[in-house]
Image (spheres, grey):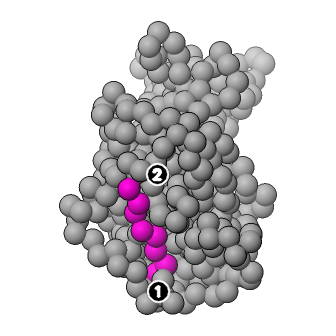
């Protein structure tokens, strides 16, 4: 499943490739609540860049429609110490709360959001097992030291290493995931909230349903719905018009850009230009766009926009080899999403706010 901006190693064409999906594991904890009223937009200040440039202006107009998506689920880890002795962690409580972040784009005024499927439908693989191992390690280490009494005592780092390598056998179990959408500061303006939990309800909404999806091992796109009305939105473009050397712009929320945990920082999007390197087709028949440029964990699900501000790609995964530095980023072609939109008969006509 490539690396979905978390890590999984697969053998492809006689060499090991790190195929990374661009979702980013987070350490922020918040409770997914139910949004209330229709949001009211607030000015966030002067738009970025030279607004007399039509490309810059198109990107500025699109930015309020790009949202940050957090997906959470509870997880437990059963650790097998002996053939007949297994212990489930945490020993108290319902589980460890795992939180991941990605991006998405409002493609209608009525809360329909385009994203990567793995952002809202987390694959139960190394993307989840690694952060689960790290969260469980302190509890497992304490249990070993108190009950098995090794000399010298084991450390948290040692336990993490043994869980990850399989030297200490374990089995994860996962609950049902829930996703919540947060509007960006391009829509809300700066926020007074000190935590994600305290972001006003009108600027967030739970994902109430996945309307259509193409699994991560197929096209890795999904359209989800949140109770948001009269929103900024972006139109889908025709990805068949994308050619080598075209310049595209991605908007997203890379985890490496989170310099603090204040909501204004977490919900301020990043804009990066990328260049189309090639158009490829996966073994599953999905058309993907290979790009060069700054694509990071957390951008997954975010839009790649053409010069008119239309979505022509969805950030999906990275390919890397452990034998060489660097990685190559891939977008899912927007025409895969257009098929889903057509099957749902979505009304993507811009609403009053977008027209204004």
Span highlighted in magenta in the image: 231-238
User: For the point 47% across and 9% down, which residue is it?
Assistant: 14
Provide residue 150's location: percent of width, then percent of height.
Answer: 70, 19
Horizontal arrangement in the rendering, residue 59 relative to residue 193 (left or right): left
Query: Disc 1 or 2, which lies upstream in sequence?
Result: 2
141 or 70, which lies in front?
70
Q: Give the percent coordinates (x, y) of residue 86.
A: 46, 28
Q: Name the residue under label 1.
A: 355
| Viewer-proximal residue among 85 and 96 | 96
Marks 1 and 2, how far apart in space? 23 Å
Rendered image quadrant of residue 294: top right
Foreground residue, 81 or 103? 103
State yes or no: residue 232 in magenta.
Answer: yes
Locate the N terminus by quadrant.
Answer: top left
Q: What element carries label 2?
A: strand
Which residue of the protein is positioned furthest toward the top in this rendering? 14
Report helix, strand or loop for mark 1.
Answer: helix
Q: Residue 313 carries which label?
A: 2
């Amino acid at each position: 499943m490539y690396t979905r901006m978390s890590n999984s190693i697969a053998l492809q064409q006689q060499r090991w490739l790190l195929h990374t999906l661009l979702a980013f594991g987070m350490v922020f904890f918040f409770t997914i609540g139910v949004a209330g009223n229709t949001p009211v937009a607030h000015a966030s200040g002067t738009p970025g860049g030279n607004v007399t440039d039509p490309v810059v202006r198109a990107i500025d107009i699109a930015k309020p429609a790009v949202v940050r998506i957090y997906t959470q689920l509870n997880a437990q880890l059963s650790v097998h110490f002996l053939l007949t002795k297994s212990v489930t962690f945490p020993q108290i409580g319902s589980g460890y709360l795992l939180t991941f972040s990605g991006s998405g784009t409002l493609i209608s005024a009525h809360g329909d959001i385009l994203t990567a499927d793995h952002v809202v439908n987390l694959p139960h693989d190394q993307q989840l097992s690694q952060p689960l191992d790290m969260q469980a390690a302190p509890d497992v280490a304490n249990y070993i030291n108190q009950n098995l009494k090794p000399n010298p005592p084991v450390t948290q780092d040692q336990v993490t290493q043994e869980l990850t390598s399989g030297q200490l056998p374990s089995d994860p179990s996962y609950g049902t995931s829930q996703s919540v959408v947060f509007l960006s500061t391009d829509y809300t303006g700066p926020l007074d909230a000190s935590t994600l939990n305290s972001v006003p309800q009108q600027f967030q909404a739970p994902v109430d349903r996945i309307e259509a999806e193409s699994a991560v091992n197929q096209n890795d796109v999904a359209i989800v719905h949140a109770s948001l009305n009269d929103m900024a939105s972006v139109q889908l473009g025709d990805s068949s018009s994308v050619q080598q050397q075209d310049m595209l712009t991605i908007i997203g929320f890379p985890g490496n850009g989170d310099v603090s945990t204040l909501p204004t920082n977490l919900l301020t999007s990043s804009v990066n230009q990328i260049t189309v390197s090639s158009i490829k087709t996966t073994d599953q028949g999905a058309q993907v766009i290979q790009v060069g440029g700054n694509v990071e964990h957390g951008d997954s699900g975010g839009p790649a926009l053409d010069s008119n501000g239309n979505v022509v790609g969805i950030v999906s995964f990275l390919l890397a080899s452990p034998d060489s530095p660097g990685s190559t980023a891939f977008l899912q072609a927007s025409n895969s999403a257009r098929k889903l939109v057509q099957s749902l008969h979505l009304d993507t006509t811009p609403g009053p706010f977008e027209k204004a």
